[in-house]
Amino acid sequence: EGNVRQQHLAVQDLDKIKPEELTPLTPEVISRQATINVGTIGHVAHGKSTVVKSLSGVKTVRFKNELERNITIKLGYAN
């Protein structure tokens, strides 16, 4: 019984998939990506926001007072 349908996965029909059109965000690829949660902890100004931005592309410093002081004050999440 190797043909068990897993509802959360997009169907990958090898006769229809064109590898040159696949991107990390196409359903055939993204439905099979592992989910990982990474937390950061450390002292002020030790590069936690820089690491988050490097990994996710999300700028965690968003508010005026954070930009002025060059620190992240409010907790946030990056997907």
Image (cartoon, rainbow, N blue to C red):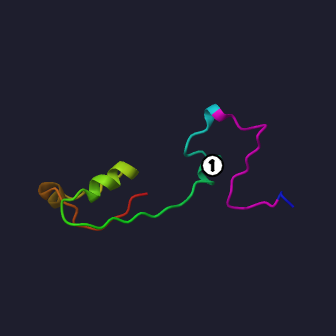
Q: Residue at x 63, y 54 (%)?
A: 32
User: Residue 59: percent from the left, percent from the top?
Assistant: 30, 52
Q: Which x, y percent locates residue 5?
A: 78, 60
Q: Is residue 39 above or below residue 59?
A: below
For the C terminus, the image quarter is bottom left
Q: Is label 1 in a helix, a strand or a loop?
A: helix
Q: Residue furthest right?
A: 1
Q: Nearer the viewer, residue 44 or 11?
A: 44
Residue type marked 1: Pro
At 67% from the left and 61% from the top, the residue drawn is: 8
Q: Which residue range is magenta in the image?
A: 4-19
Q: Is residue 10 magenta?
A: yes
Residue farthest along the top direction in this orientation = 20
| Residue at 63% across, 49% down | 27
Q: Principal SS element in the magenta part? A: loop
Q: Which residue is mark 1?
A: 27
Report if residue 26 lies within the magenta region: no
Placement of the N terminus among the 4 image quadrants? bottom right
Q: Position of residue 25 (x, y in %)?
A: 55, 46
Instruction: Sort mark 1 into few (<14), some (14-19) or many (20+) by Cα contacts within 10 Å.
Output: some
Left or right position of 33 against 47: right
Answer left or right for 74 relative to 17: left
